């Protein structure tokens, strides 16, 4: 194996959020394994380390720029190569993170009191950026049937038709349920939003982390110039560089783009991030392919071990992300209590209810780790649920 994803890299004592605290912000118990926040416990691809090492060894970290052709070509080349999306770089706004960018989009594209449509169970900051900006959360819950999640288009059409609901945040692929939306589903979401004057914001941060044979459709590849569409991507999940802070927001509408750019304000461009991003997007495809193969095996291993120890547990087919979303409602429906118990026993995962009331009975478990962690996690989980 060219890359050793089984390698254990001890992250404790490195100020890693995942490895210092649990979801309740309590320090991890000694020897705990942490599988909550969405970063990976794998070493980054060697070209990223080399690029960072070269930059560090220059020993000067002054003001820096990322408006140059090599950088932009690295970004657009990657999405064209991997997703067939010909980006329009004029639409691109740089931001240090998708969550702060979403907050700016909500602030500048909606008015106080407006409704923002989200599809729970979903990544909690979608609600946070809404309520922190004094906007209302409008839920269009996903439907879970026969082990599969799908969108409720009738409910979405009703909610979009309310003129007070002016923006929708779509998670594509979906965290935590792992759905990779089909082009037909994406066209339908956009159609409903467009016909009702709802600005659609598509968060595509998980788009590179799909199971073998799955394909992500970038929203802007379907509707390249849609004036009521915004799409967000980032190299941070894909290449495990979340702490370096980098994301790209694509805004076809020039006035909205200006407002979002102004809202994001003056940024200090981190020169280390720039080097890492160029390396990631231009020299790490084979690492990413190897990572995906390892993650596929992690899912298979997790599902099999879980079924063996907890035969009544199930899990939807998870086509994207590196997160598992097992349904353990046959054992308990109080996942907050379970989350606490697991943390005390040395396993840090997230109660499904943190992603919305619809997540009760589920857990979110981050599988982007050496397989040996998964084996230990299933033991701790199964013991807690069966004794
Ligand atoms: C759907 C989604 N969007 C955004 C983020 C975080 O983005 P950033 O770190 O760029 O703010 C995450 C992280 O888990 C996520 O799952």
Image: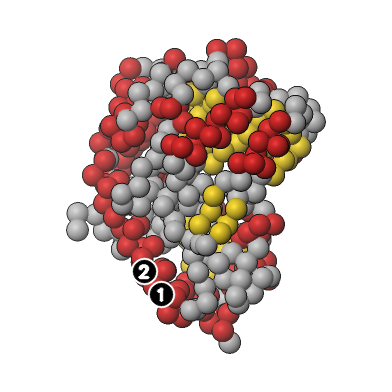
Q: Secondary structure at mark 1?
A: helix
Total numbered circles: 2
Describe residue 140's horizontal placement relative to residue 60 as left or right: right
What's the colour scheme? secondary structure
Numbered tag placed on residue 291 in the rendering:
none
Position in image of residue 269 (x %, y %): 47, 26
Q: Residues within 10 Å of mark 2 (few under 14, many from 20)?
A: some
Q: Quadrant of the N terminus?
A: bottom left
Mark 1 — residue? 305
Percent x, y of residue 201: 57, 31
Tell which residue pokes out farthest to the left in this image.
1
Position of the C terminus, as image quadrant, is bottom right
Relative vertical location of residue 349 with respect to residue 179 in this rendering, above or below: below
Q: Which residue is mark 2?
A: 301
Cβ atoms under marks 1 and 2 closer than 8 Å: yes
| SS type, badge 2 | helix
Left-right relation of 185 to 100: left
Residue at 56% x, 84% y is 386
Query: In this orientation, does residue 86 appear?
Result: yes
Q: Name the foreground residue: 133 vs 136.
A: 136
Residue appearing at x 39%, y 23% in the figure? 87
Q: Residue at x 69, y 57 (%)?
A: 357
Q: Which residue sits furthest bottom?
A: 387
Quadrant location of residue 238? top left
Residue at position x 24%, y 54% from top?
3
Establish if 379 lies above or below 2: below
């Amino acid at each position: 194996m060219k890359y050793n994803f089984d390698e254990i890299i001890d992250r404790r004592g490195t100020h890693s959020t995942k490895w210092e605290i649990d979801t309740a912000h309590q320090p991890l118990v000694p020897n705990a394994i942490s599988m909550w926040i969405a970063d990976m416990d794998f070493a980054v691809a060697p070209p990223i380390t080399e690029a960072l090492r070269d930059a560090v060894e220059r020993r000067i970290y002054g003001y820096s720029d990322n408006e140059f052709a090599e950088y932009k070509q690295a970004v657009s080349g990657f999405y064209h190569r991997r997703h067939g999306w010909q980006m329009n770089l004029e639409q691109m706004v740089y931001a240090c993170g998708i969550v702060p960018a979403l907050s700016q989009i909500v602030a500048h594209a909606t008015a106080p009191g407006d409704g923002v449509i989200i599809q729970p169970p979903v990544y909690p900051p979608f609600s946070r950026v809404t309520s922190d900006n004094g906007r209302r959360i409008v839920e269009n819950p996903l439907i879970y049937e026969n082990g599969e999640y799908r969108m409720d288009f009738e409910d979405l059409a009703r909610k979009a038709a309310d003129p007070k609901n002016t923006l929708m945040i779509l998670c594509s692929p979906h965290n935590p349920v792992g759905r990779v939306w089909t082009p037909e589903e994406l066209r339908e979401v956009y159609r409903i939003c467009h016909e009702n004057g709802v600005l659609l914001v598509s968060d595509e941060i998980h788009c590179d982390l799909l199971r073998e044979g799955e394909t992500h459709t970038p929203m802007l590849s379907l509707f390249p110039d849609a004036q009521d569409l915004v799409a967000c991507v980032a190299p941070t999940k894909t290449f495990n560089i979340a702490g370096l802070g980098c994301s790209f927001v694509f805004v076809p509408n020039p006035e909205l783009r200006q407002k979002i750019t102004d809202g994001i304000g003056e940024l200090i461009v981190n020169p280390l991030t720039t080097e890492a991003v160029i390396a990631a997007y231009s020299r790490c495809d084979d690492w990413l392919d190897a990572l995906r193969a390892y993650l596929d095996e992690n899912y298979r291993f997790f599902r099999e071990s879980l079924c063996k120890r907890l035969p009544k547990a199930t899990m939807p087919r998870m086509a994207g992300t590196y997160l598992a979303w097992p349904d353990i409602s046959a054992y308990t429906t109080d996942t907050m209590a379970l989350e606490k118990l697991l943390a005390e026993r040395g396993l840090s995962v997230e109660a499904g209810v943190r992603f919305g009331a619809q997540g009760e009975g589920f857990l979110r478990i981050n599988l982007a780790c050496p397989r040996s962690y998964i084996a230990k996690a299933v033991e701790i989980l199964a013991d807690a649920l069966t004794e």
